[in-house]
Structures are given as structure tokens and as C-alpha cells.
Image: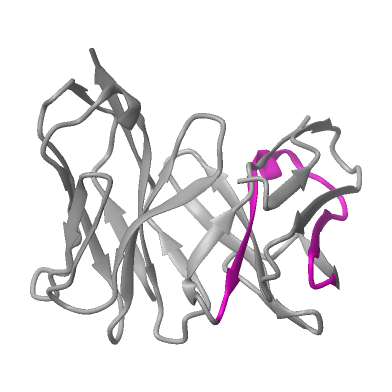
Amino acid sequence: DADVTQTPRNRITKTGKRIMLECSQTKGHDRMYWYRQDPGLGLRLIYYSFDVKDINKGEISDGYSVSRQAQAKFSLSLESAIPNQTALYFCATSDLAEGPDTQYFGPGTRLTVL
Amino acid sequence: GNSVTQMEGPVTLSEEAFLTINCTYTATGYPSLFWYVQYPGEGLQLLLKATKADDKGSNKGFEATYRKETTSFHLEKGSVQVSDSAVYFCALINNAGNMLTFGGGTRLMVKP
């Protein structure tokens, strides 16, 4: 679904480097989320934001930070990447009017930390 | 806290076979329940949902019934196709409606 885009799609980096993953959406949704996917563990919520001035920690926020620059943009940063942050990262959006339970996902960013 | 448990995969079936993927959950209150599907190389897509006990969600030939007495939401399809090959995730959302909790995912492989 091109309404939610993520950049980059793939990234290989080294331990200790700072990394930013970006998410943009054209759906006009207020709510945005960052998840990571690990084999056998499903998706786990890192951070979520219900509007530009609202940032909330999810299940596994340690080692990550986020910035909601605008309604349409939500960035995830790894200040000092470590190998166990190697995973597939997904951004998602939802709209309270449509129902907070219906989330639209981007295509994912595959991050490898060496 | 909330949790979702799915049967482990991969599940390998022949085309036109009957599919069941088991999902059970633990949650306080009355969560809404979902099945998401992830096709290769793509993000997750909502497949179906149910918001209260005994509701049946359905889409694209898939069905799941919200069973509060057994805390289950099993996914079924009567006749699978090769194009159904994907990873399927069961999920729930808490009463506050702000956090989806996912199961570990079940990979389905359908052979011609």
C-alpha cells in the first residue's frame, strides 16, 4: 500500500552507528506506530503517537527514540545500534474515525547491525 | 498482560485443502480480535476482525469466530489456493484501543 512509505527499505550498518528510519503517510491519519518483527515473535510495538505532540513508549522502547515531525511523518532512531536490533521494522497508521484497531502497514525496513 | 498464542508453522497444504490456524488469547476485559496477513516482501494487511463475543469475521473466504468461553479466534478457510501462501498473524487490541498485541505468526505454504 503506497499510502504508507518507509525509507530506506534495506540498511546494513555497524555497531555503535546512529541510524534513522523514516515513515511517511498520505492517508491523513493521526495515529502512527513503529514495530519490529523478529522470527517467531510476531510484531512488537516500539513507540506510538496519536498526534504531533503525543509520543508514547510501547513494549520495547529501550535503545530507540522517535520524532513526530508532522502529522504525516514519524521517524525512528537508533542512537547507537547493536546487533540484537537486527530486525524488520514496520511503520503503521490508523485513524480514530475509522477505528484504532485497523492499522495500515508500510512495506518494512530490513535493518542489519553488524 | 495481554498475550496471543498461535500454532507454530509452517503449515503446508495442498491446493483446495481445508485450513485451520489456531489462535488463543489472554486479555483483561473485552478485546477486539484480528487476523492480519503478510505476503512475501510486504507489510501486514488486515484480513478480518471481530469486536465482541460470538462475532464472526470473514473476508476472501477466510472466517474466524470470537469465542470468549475458550478465548479463541481460530482462522479457517474451506479451500485454500496457492495465492494464500503467506504468514498469518492473530492479534488483539486492548480496551484502551492503543496497542495491538500480535501472536508469533504462522507461515502457510500451499502447494499446487
**Residue B39, position as x, y percentages in the image:** 46, 34
Q: Nearer the viewer, residue B47 or B100?
A: B47
Question: What's drawn in magenta, residue-wise?
Answer: A70-96
In the displayed orientation, state which residue is furthest to the top.
Answer: B112
Q: Is B94 above or below relative to A61?
A: below
Q: Is A8 above or below relative to B30?
A: above
**Residue A43, position as x, y percentages in the image:** 51, 53
Q: Quadrant of residue A96?
A: bottom right
Q: How is the image coloured?
A: one colour
Please tell me which residue is depicted at 73% across the width and 48% down the height of the picture: A5
Please tell me which residue is depicted at 60% across the width and 46% down the height of the picture: A1
Residue A71 lies in the magenta stretch: yes
Q: Is B31 above or below relative to B33?
A: below
**Residue A108, position as x, y percentages in the image:** 65, 42
Q: Quadrant of the C terminus of chain A?
A: top right
Q: Is residue A36 left or right of residue B14?
A: right
**Residue B62, position as x, y percentages in the image:** 22, 47
